[in-house]
Amino acid sequence: MKISIIGTGHVGLVTGACFAEKGHDVLCADSDAEKISRLRSGVMPFFEPGLDGIVKKHSAAGRLKFGTSVSEAVRHGQAIFISVWTPPLKTGKADLSFVENVCREIAGSLRAGERRLIVEKSTVPVNTARRVLDTLNRYASRDASFSVASNPEFLREGTAVEDTLKPDRIVFGVADAESERTLREIYSAFNAPIIVTDVASAELIKHASNSFLAMKISFINAVSLICEHSGADVTRVAEGMGMDHRIQRAFLNAGIGYGGSCFPKDVSAFIDISRELGYEFRLLEEVERINRDMRTHFFRKIERELWILKGKKIAALGLSFKPGTDDMRMAPSLTVIEELMKEGAAVSAFDPVSIPAARAAFGEKGIREGGLLSFASSAEEACAGAEAVCVFTEWPEIVQADWKTIGESVRTRIVFDGRNCLDATALRAAGWTVKGMGRPMA
Ligand code: UDX
């Protein structure tokens, strides 16, 4: 089928490439002309394992094209997926102005006799589709023919291609049988269970799923604090809880908290839309609070152990919000490193792929390289001469670094493991003080 995708972020670009992989004829449009010209020459706008391979393969085969014009996208695609960003405003509300702009442009390009299915792919608050429909009705010509559906995306950064090609489930929120038929045809080559709902329920499935996962993380993080006070080990607690099939082990990894572009944004947008609809979602407010507090808790742990931070070199390993991505949005490392530098510590940071993105993220906060912040090209280099090592992200390059060499080059063998990813027993045997999260001796 001919499909158009508007917006080439993590969701749009991966979805477009995966639709091409399933044999569709895809046009990805984005208003950022520079990004589109780089994509045309095979340069990816972000790091995502496996993405550039399928983009290049299908671009060469002519199944995946790139453009800057919404009207061209409307002409091309029988189905048009909106996957522009919905960033959080200062109030926590999702900024839907990009969605509205695209809808207005789509409306202006719809033609009589050419039915189009407009699909919400971006994560949006419940009832956004109603607004999308109103906008299209307001700005389209009377004889335009279209429907609006919701088809939320559940991909994770770092495994986005695999998640999209082999999803746990596919959700169609539709208002009519024809929309369902079109979506079924698009997904006919995907081997995954499909749930068909009304449009509002589909929108809600996405916000509720992400908020539930964030809640699981904050729950285990709260338990990890109890573990630290009682001498229990949160990893064993999570294991024991996870063996109950009603609970499951996934997303019970205690640590320094969740970051990224989705959980923080979606939890606050869900709180906001709930309030607008008349419900104070206090449970989720607490989820956010616990998440914020984990960063402070981690920083205080460092401060308690090292006493004076001024003038001390501290190695920071793993900068992105999680492994497998160079995404620095809401990364816990940013907050803690900033706090360390405020106290006068010199931070030597390493990440296998995120150093350019980290430079930009620190730059936005007015923090430049040089002075107290430096970047190293390996974990070993970052740790040489350090008074302590902090691990923010469980990249394999960090977990499997040469900890023997690191142990010989640090000034003092103290490691703060913000993800409980290191082999604490082996490190302790080698003379390290290991401070994990919610574990004995943490
Ligand atoms: C998430 C959802 O998983 C995905 O379905 C949705 O489409 C987008 O948001 P993503 O943000 O890419 O995906 O990463 P995810 O793997 O879910 O991790 C999010 C954050 O939670 C990371 O900072 C990670 O380190 C943290 N996390 C995850 C924990 O702290 N503990 C866990 O047990 C799991």
Image (spheres, grey):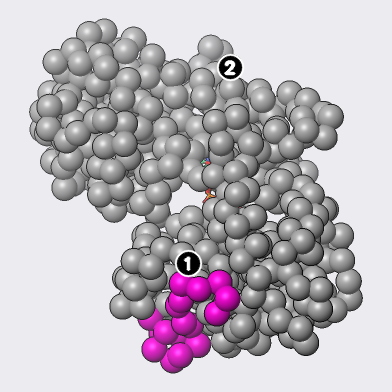
**Would residue 425 be seen by someone viewing this image from the given angle?**
no
Q: From the viewer's side, name the closer residue of 377 and 115.
A: 115
- The numbered mark at residue 30 is 1
Q: Residue 141's quadrant in the figure?
A: bottom right
Residue 251 placement, left or right of 274: left
Give the SS element for disc 2.
Answer: helix
Q: CA distance from mark 2 to mark 1?
A: 48 Å
In the rendered image of this protein, does residue 185 appear above or below residue 416?
Answer: below
Q: To which quarter of the image does residue 412 belong? A: top left
The span picked out in magenta is 56-72
Name which residue lies at 46% across and 64% down. 31
Q: Position of residue 114 (x, y in %)?
A: 74, 85
Image quadrant holding the C terminus, namely: top left
- Residue 264's quadrant in the figure? top right
Q: Which residue is mark 2?
A: 226
x and y, in percent, of residue 13 in the image: 49, 68
